[in-house]
Image (cartoon, helix red, strand yellow):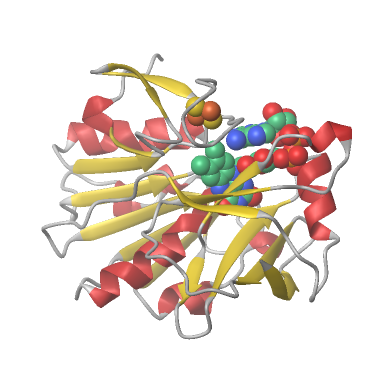
């Protein structure tokens, strides 16, 4: 794929917009792409990234990437016109809720699949509430984009924007009654477990998108498995999206 645009959002996050010379296949929110990173020995394995948004008209999709280590640092240095070898779309997707009372919860780079999910819900006449958690004001980005598709609430760890605290401290997830019949969540494991507990306590349906470390990304190496009610399942094939009732999370 050819990179048609790179956008630096802040010190740690950037967006790659990728153009396919052929028509894009149908992609669903929650699915991911496996990106090959140069040919350095330390980045031999592809790196997985959620589909952040799709434009079928332009034959492009976007990845929102947080710089973590060697691979993402290398990707952050790519420029318009460079090529990338990408396997996509991989994995399953969030299911279409049978209710209009939907809450999307994202934290850190776990916000990435939620923009595509919000777009998809809008196309299906659902306007979700979107709760996004960031470390600090400098990392709050693309709020206008999310706001096109739903009502957005923000938390920051240091209180520099939105409500101070974690997403689970926000009033939309607090209170005796939860106003939502479906929660879709992606972010750090500890955050998803906390959101899952709130959902379970209120009897609310909840799906989470796991970001287990992956190698192949298409089901052969078994390094990404997670314990479920059907035994160990591959996050890259049977996931990354799981209903919380299916997961055997310890802790
Ligand atoms: C299905 C899926 C979707 C993802 N979507 C996104 C996305 O949209 N945007 C994004 O920025 N990141 C996403 N990630 C995480 C991303 O793949 C890793 O951050 C990336 O592979 C790190 O590569 P690196 O070479 O920069 O870091 P490495 O040098 O490989 O690792 C640097 C640090 O990051 C940690 N790390 C590596 N992989 C993961 C992982 N999968 N989860 C948590 N920590 C990890 C390592 O343990 C290490 O501490 C996703 C992961 C999965 C499995
Ligand atoms: S990453 Fe290889 S089986 Fe999932």
Q: Report whether 102 appears left or right of 211.
A: left
The image position of residue 9, as x and y in percent, is: 71, 68
Q: Which residue is found at the position 50% from the left and 25% from the top? A: 220
Q: Report whether 60 appears left or right of 180.
A: right
Q: Which residue is found at the position 24% from the left and 18% from the top? A: 230
Number of marks in picture: 0
The image position of residue 151, as x and y in percent, is: 35, 72
Task: Find residue 63 and report its image quarter.
Answer: bottom right
The image position of residue 159, as x and y in percent, is: 60, 55
The image quadrant where one finds the N terminus is bottom right
Q: Please, is residue 158 above or below residue 4 in the view?
A: above
The image position of residue 81, as x and y in percent, is: 79, 75
Q: Residue furthest front?
A: 22
Of residue 160 and residue 4, the one placed in the foreground of this image is: 4
Q: Is residue 160 visible?
A: no
Q: Is residue 71 visible?
A: yes
Q: Please, is residue 52 above or below residue 206 in the view?
A: below
Q: Report whether 50 appears left or right of 18.
A: left
Q: Which residue is found at the position 38% from the left and 58% from the top? A: 29
The image quadrant where one finds the C terminus is top left
Q: Report whether 231 appears left or right of 131.
A: left
């Amino acid at each position: 794929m050819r990179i048609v645009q790179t956008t630096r959002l802040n010190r740690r996050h950037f967006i790659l917009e990728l153009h396919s010379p052929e028509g894009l296949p149908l992609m669903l929110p929650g699915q991911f792409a496996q990106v090959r990173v140069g040919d350095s020995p330390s980045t031999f394995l592809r790196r997985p990234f959620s589909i952040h948004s799709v434009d079928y008209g332009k034959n492009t999709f976007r990845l929102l990437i947080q710089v973590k280590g060697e691979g993402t640092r290398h990707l952050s240095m790519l420029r318009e016109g460079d090529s990338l070898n990408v396997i996509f779309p991989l994995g399953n997707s969030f299911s279409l809720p049978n209710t209009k009372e939907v809450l999307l919860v994202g934290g850190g780079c776990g916000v990435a699949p939620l923009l595509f999910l919000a777009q998809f819900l809008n196309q299906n006449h659902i306007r979700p509430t979107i709760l996004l958690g960031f470390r600090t004001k400098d990392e709050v980005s693309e709020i206008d984009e999310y706001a096109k598709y739903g009502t957005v609430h923000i938390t920051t760890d240091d209180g520099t924007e939105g409500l101070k605290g974690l997403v689970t401290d926000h009033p939309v997830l607090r209170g005796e009654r939860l106003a939502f019949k479906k929660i879709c969540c992606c972010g750090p494991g500890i955050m998803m477990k906390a959101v899952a507990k709130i959902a379970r306590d209120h009897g609310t349906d909840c799906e989470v998108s796991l970001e287990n470390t992956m190698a192949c990304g298409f089901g052969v190496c078994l390094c990404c498995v997670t314990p479920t009610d059907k035994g160990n399942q591959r996050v890259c094939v049977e996931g990354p999206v799981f209903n919380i009732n299916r997961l055997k999370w310890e802790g």
